[in-house]
Amino acid sequence: MKLEPFIEDTKQVLMARAWSQYSENLVVGFSTKNGGVSEEQFESLNLGLHVHDEPDSVISNRKKLADILHFPLESWVCSEQTHKNKIAKVTKKDLGAGVFTYEEGIKDTDGLYTDEKNILLTLGFADCVPLYFFAPSKQLIGIAHAGWKGTVQDIAGEMVLAWKKEDVNPNEIQAIIGPSIGKCCYIVDDYVMNFVKDLDNVDSKPYEKMSDNQYRLELKELNYQLLVRAGIPPENIQVSSYCTSCENQLFFSHRRDGGKTGRMMSFIGLKED
């Protein structure tokens, strides 16, 4: 059994250290909901600018994370996430996108990657599956946001396809599936399951029928299968056991909190030597 890839580094962040064997300058992790300044349902490290929290509080929280990671806000790149499968290649010209206002993020994009140093790629989460990608030989890094919609549109495979165009062989890609809602807490209906059942590139659909129109769905496992089907070797994929809904002391959860909640952030960046 593989070890949990995420380790609590400070009360604000969980860090994934497994890829440090390739580069000590690689920064990979996922924020918690703790150690910030937001109040009420956003208490306290809300990093989402689009959830009706006080913008000044969110920026203060982002600055706190920037200080912890030693990645200034001006080096961050954020996107306007729309639960689709669009992937964007990020360059220095995108620095600062979406950092201070959500509307200035990279439009209609749920996956980001770059081959440039000193850029922190970021995405927001409150139950959906964060995917992390790294190709050591090309020093290519990427992240993706896979809710059920992005998953059935195979955003995982779209990232691999984009990297093939960068001359990256899928068998050299390392991937991590981050903290997200587990099968224990993620109940969906026939509408969602019809999309899952229609996936023709997944052999075994990871769901359990509870009753009419009620299913437990394991999105992490579904994304794992899609990554493998895209060509990433199973031994190159790590999966977090954290459930964002169960771990109410660590994470915001859209499902658990009835939609009124904050956002965690996935991030990946490669610092200059």
Image (cartoon, grey):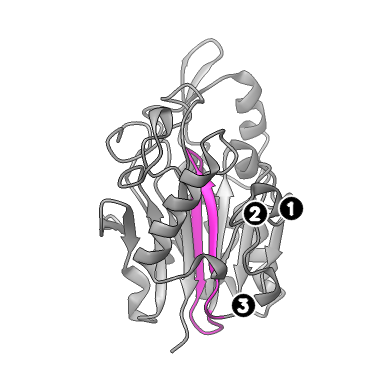
> How many other residues sit within 10 Å of disc 1, few (<14), some (14-19) or many (≥20)?
some
Q: Which of marks 2 and 3 is nearer the N terminus?
A: 2
Which amino acid type corresponds to the residue marked 1 in the rendered image? Lys
Determine the secondary structure under disc 2: loop
Q: Sequence order check: which comes first, mark 3 or mark 1?
A: 1
Which residue does the image show at 31% across and 68% down from the upper left?
A: 17
Residue drawn 58% across the image and 45% down it: 202
* Label 2 to label 1: alpha-carbon separation: 6 Å
Locate residue 77: give its quadrant: bottom right
2 or 1: tag closer to the N-terminus: 2
Per the rendering, the mark at residue 79 is 2
Q: Is residue 84 magenta?
A: no
Height in image: 175 above or below 259? below
User: Where's residue 13, x and y in %?
Assistant: 33, 55
Q: Which of marks 2 and 3 is in front?
A: 2
The residue depicted at 67 percent of the width and 32 percent of the height is 195
Q: Which mark is residue 107?
A: 1
Q: Mark 3 and 1 residues: CB-CB less than 8 Å, in contact?
A: no
Where does the magenta region start and end?
A: 117-139
> Do tag 2 and tag 1 residues touch (Cβ < 8 Å)?
yes
Answer left or right for 13 relative to 224: left
* Residue at disc 1, secondary structure: loop
141 in relation to 130, above or below: below
Q: What residue type is labelled 2?
A: Ser
The one of 194 and 163 positioned closer to us in this rendering: 163
Residue at the location (55% across, 70% down)? 75
Q: Distance between the residues labelled 2 and 3?
A: 24 Å
Q: How crowded is mark 2: few (under 14 residues within 10 Å), some or many (20 or more)?
A: many
Q: Where is residue 159 in the image (x, y as percent from the top left)?
A: 63, 61
Which residue position is annotated with label 3? 168
The image quadrant of residue 99 is bottom right
